[in-house]
Image: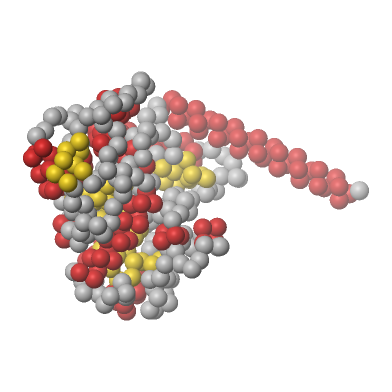
């Protein structure tokens, strides 16, 4: 989506209407600056074009791209507001803060008692607030003390919430839902080995959250934007979360961009000075994100990922190998056993099938090596 010249008044109106009210910029609009990049590829053209005008600017001032991006991305996904950040971890930390603030302001949770739940085997990032939610020893050991009242274990009931186990979540919410502000969930657990939940799991999560007035936060940083054969992975269950987290693919692979999307009831709980990021919503990132979202639609990447993913899994399951226990996934986010396979969305069918052939050849070589090692051990035992 190409940006066009706007008046200062139009710029400020767009940002106020569609951007989270976590800044109160001075009434000065940045539009042009010195600097140029000379690269040559499709999404990067937006970066190059924008870089010739204005690269980075603080949200302490208006810039003439963020308002357009905010309008574009909120309409694209059907939310009132966007809070722009740079990395996925920043987006998750933002969601934790925002959901706590909502819990105190809107749900009347007693100050200091708000709980943000997650699941076991989750991965949402590596900052201290996020690793406080983790059950991975590598992420946690040596980094305590941890943030209280976040994670898969409810501090009041002691019940652990396992992924894809709706009974665990139901128990916790039935017994202590009044203090739970949000439930953070990955539509597919990526780092855990592409763990795909049962059909209907996310829909039941949504229903439970609505019943107990709990925000459902979908972490689509890894799964979102056509990767799983839907625009959002959560679309497989026809669910709309209260808060949507995006990153990775939003950057088009050329510039760090992440986003938190929510409706006004949630987003307007944050006031100027309570949260921010110096370069979140910078003109370069905004231009790149709009271009990336345009490419997803123009190149029909959702349908492509769906079709190629089905062909990939069908081809993999035909491979005869005792080392291949399971192939699972959605779209072009798959795993063989626990090995994650996420090829670029621009991959061709021929290239994908070449990959299948290489996997099959590698498994055969692995069995030959394993057999040779077994014979060598037998020979040692005989001596």
Residue 50 location in percent, x, y? 26, 29
Q: How is the model colour-coded?
A: secondary structure
Residue at horizontal 55%, vertical 57%?
138
380 up-or-down from 314: above or below? below
Q: How many marks?
A: 0
**Left or right position of 219 against 286:** right
Residue at horizontal 16%, vertical 51%?
80
Q: Quadrant of residue 167?
A: bottom left
Q: Quadrant of residue 161?
A: bottom left
Residue at horizontal 14%, vertical 29%?
4
239 up-or-down from 308: above or below? below
Q: Please state which of residues 177 and 351 is positioned toward the viewer in this rendering.
A: 177
Report whether residue 67 is seen. Answer: no
Residue 171 location in percent, x, y? 34, 75
Give the position of the N terminus as an image quadrant: top left
Q: Quadrant of residue 177?
A: bottom left
113 up-or-down from 324: above or below? below
Q: Please state which of residues 354 and 267 is positioned toward the viewer in this rendering.
A: 267
Residue 247 location in percent, x, y? 34, 45
Residue 376 location in percent, x, y? 81, 43
Q: Please state which of residues 311 and 3 is positioned toward the viewer in this rendering.
A: 3
Report whether residue 304 is seen. Answer: yes
């Amino acid at each position: 989506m190409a940006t066009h010249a706007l008046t200062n008044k139009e710029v400020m109106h767009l940002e106020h209407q569609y951007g989270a009210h976590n800044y109160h910029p001075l009434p000065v609009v940045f539009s042009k600056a010195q600097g140029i990049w000379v690269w040559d590829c499709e999404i990067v053209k937006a970066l190059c074009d924008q870089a010739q005008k204005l690269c980075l600017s603080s949200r302490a001032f208006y810039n003439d791209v963020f308002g357009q991006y905010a309008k574009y991305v909120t309409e694209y996904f059907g939310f009132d507001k966007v809070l722009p950040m740079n990395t996925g971890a920043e987006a998750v930390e933002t969601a934790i803060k925002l959901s706590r603030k909502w819990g105190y302001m809107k749900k009347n949770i007693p100050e200091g008692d708000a709980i943000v739940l997650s699941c076991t085997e989750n991965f949402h990032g590596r900052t201290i607030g996020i690793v406080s939610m983790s059950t991975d020893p590598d992420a946690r050991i040596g980094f305590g003390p941890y943030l209280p009242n976040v994670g898969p274990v409810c501090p009041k009931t002691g019940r652990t919430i396992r992924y894809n186990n709706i009974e665990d979540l139901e128990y916790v919410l039935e017994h202590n839902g009044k203090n739970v502000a949000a439930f953070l969930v990955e539509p597919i657990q990526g780092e855990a080995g592409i763990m795909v939940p049962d059909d209907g799991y996310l829909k039941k999560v949504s229903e439970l959250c609505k019943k107990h007035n709990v925000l459902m936060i979908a972490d689509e940083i890894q799964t979102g934007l056509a990767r799983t054969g839907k625009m959002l992975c959560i679309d497989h269950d026809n669910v709309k979360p209260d808060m949507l987290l995006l990153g990775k693919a939003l950057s088009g692979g050329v510039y760090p961009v992440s986003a938190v999307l929510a409706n006004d009831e949630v987003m307007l709980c944050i006031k100027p000075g309570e949260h921010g990021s110096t370069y979140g919503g910078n003109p370069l990132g905004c231009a790149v994100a709009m271009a990336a979202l345009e490419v997803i639609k123009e190149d029909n990447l959702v349908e492509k990922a769906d079709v190629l993913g089905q062909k990939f899994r069908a081809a993999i399951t035909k491979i005869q190998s005792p080392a291949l226990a399971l192939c699972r996934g959605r779209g072009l986010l798959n795993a063989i056993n626990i090995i994650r396979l996420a090829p670029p969305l621009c991959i061709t069918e021929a290239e994908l099938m070449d990959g299948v052939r290489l996997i099959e050849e590698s498994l055969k070589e692995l069995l030959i090596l394993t057999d040779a090692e077994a014979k060598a051990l037998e020979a040692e035992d005989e001596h």
